[in-house]
Image (cartoon, helix red, strand yellow):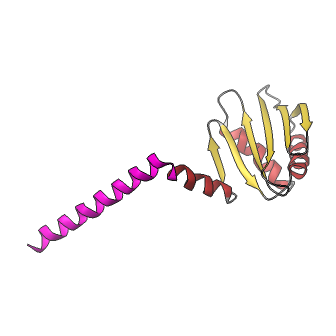
């Protein structure tokens, strides 16, 4: 008798967890949780781009990105910076192209987005990010 009651209790808990998960993913709460994790300084791989939020202004991230690309022997093909946005297009020595986009959230915080290749090369994107982090 005790075993049946325990089995029923576990199946009820499992059902509740499953329903809560379904509600979260369909209502957008899941995306909110993922975004909050990325906003806390975490690195996120999103649709072929590596993204990280920083408590740094656009100008600081731009300078660090330029220095990082020089360190890893990438050729900078174009470089634009405005007050709240910066974009650097670069090329690795093997010919693979990439870009770094920086967008301001506030005057003191920005999002850095790195994309290498057409579909996104996560390994090379991490190489670029690690080089940028060394200059911050």
Magenta stretch secondary structure, dominant: helix
Image quadrant where one finds the C terminus: bottom right
Q: Is residue 130 above or below residue 89?
A: below
Magenta-tinted stretch: 1-29
Q: Residue at x 47, y 49 (%)?
A: 27
x and y percent of residue 5 in the render? 15, 70
x and y percent of residue 91 in the render? 83, 30
Q: Is residue 115 above or below residue 26?
A: above
Instruction: Say which of 103 and 129 sits in front.
Output: 103
Q: Is residue 51 magenta?
A: no
x and y percent of residue 83 in the render? 91, 45
| Residue that lies at the very extreme toward the bottom in this rendered image | 2
Image quadrant where one finds the N terminus: bottom left
The part of the image, by quadrant, that contains residue 124 is top right
Q: Is residue 112 left or right of residue 43?
A: right
Q: Residue at x 86, y 49 (%)?
A: 58
x and y percent of residue 65 in the render? 86, 45
Query: In this orientation, does residue 61 appear?
Result: yes
Q: Is residue 81 left or right of residue 130?
A: right
Query: In this orientation, does residue 72 appear?
Result: no
Instruction: Say which of 74 and 61 sits in front.
Output: 61
Q: Is residue 72 left or right of residue 118?
A: right
Q: Residue at x 72, y 40 (%)?
A: 125
Q: How many marks?
A: 0
């Amino acid at each position: 008798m005790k075993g049946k009651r325990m089995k029923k209790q576990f199946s009820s808990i499992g059902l509740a967890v499953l329903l809560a998960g379904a509600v979260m993913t369909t209502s957008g709460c899941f995306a909110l949780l993922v975004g909050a994790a990325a906003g806390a300084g975490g690195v996120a791989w999103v649709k072929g781009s590596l993204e990280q939020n920083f408590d740094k202004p656009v100008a600081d991230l731009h300078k660090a990105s330029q220095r990082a690309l020089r360190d890893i022997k990438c050729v900078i093909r174009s470089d634009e910076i405005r007050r709240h946005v910066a974009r650097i297009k670069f090329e690795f020595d093997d010919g693979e192209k990439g870009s770094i986009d920086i967008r301001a959230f506030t005057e003191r915080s920005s999002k850095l987005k790195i994309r290498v290749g057409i579909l996104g090369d996560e390994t090379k994107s991490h190489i670029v990010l690690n080089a940028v982090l060394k200059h911050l």
